[in-house]
Image: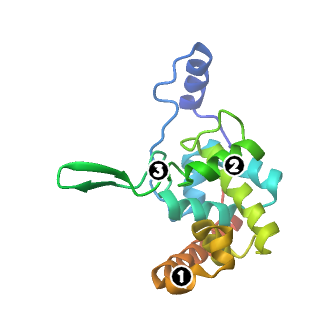
Amino acid sequence: MKNKSFKGLICAALLSSGILTGCTSNDPPSNTENICSIFQEKDSWYVSAHDVHKKWGVPINVAMAIMAQESGFKADVQPPMRWFLFIPLGRGSSAYGYPQAQDPVWSDYKDEAGSFFASRTNFADSLDFIAWYMTKTKKTNHVDFNDAFNQYLNYHEGWGGFRNKTYKSKDWLLKVARKVYKRSESYKYQLKHCKIY
């Protein structure tokens, strides 16, 4: 970013001494509708997003729009607990973290492209996962990176589900995919006019 703030210098000093409190926040950005605001508030995310773009070639606006939809940029989101009377029945799925990735596909990502220590509560790892998934979507179902609508349908339904058109019976999902597309277009426009430096 343009200038390293005093807080940034303090954080660097604390990190080098092993004290992390106050330097790494998992709080979501205050304005998730504006990607410039997100990156101004979370400058490490800006760096991570550009690293992911360089690595995979995916548009930042599409990957960020998918993450915004899945978790609202909240680090520890997971499906609600299901109950029968007072008995917990477990959660609806193993989806977790920024990308809402389920255990099996997260394991595949770690085996193929991610670090053994990759975490779904880490923004950089999570965005890298989304880019990996988008890349496999392009190879598997020939969906362009810029096609946020169909990229999201793949992300939600899985590659086999997309091929089988499981989304066709889910009007609510088609509405969500359109929302992701609109947000990605908004992010794309905003990125062209960001004054981050």
Q: Nearer the viewer, residue 161 or 119?
A: 161
Query: Mark 1 = which residue?
Result: 174
How far apart marks 2 and 1 lie (CA) works out to: 27 Å
Is tag 2's residue or tag 1's residue first in the polypeptide sequence?
2
Q: How many residues crowd around disc 3 within 10 Å: few (fewer than 14), some, or many (20 or more)?
A: many
Residue 97 picture location, percent across and down: 51, 48
Is tag 2's residue or tag 3's residue first in the polypeptide sequence?
3
Q: Residue at x 70, y 59 (%)?
A: 133
Residue type at numbered disc 1: Leu
Q: Residue at x 79, y 69 (%)?
A: 140
169 to the left or right of 132: left
Disc nearest the viewer among 3 and 1: 1
How far apart marks 3 and 1 lie (CA) works out to: 23 Å
Query: Mark 2 = which residue?
Result: 108
SS label for mark 2: helix
Q: How many residues crowd around disc 2 within 10 Å: few (fewer than 14), some, or many (20 or more)?
A: few
Residue 113 seen in the current view: no
Q: Nearer the viewer, residue 70 or 21?
A: 70
Q: Residue furthest top?
A: 17
Query: Height in image: 41 above or below 60?
Result: above
SS label for mark 1: helix
Query: Height in image: 88 above or below 5?
Result: below
Query: Mark 3 = which residue?
Result: 74
Residue type at numbered disc 3: Lys
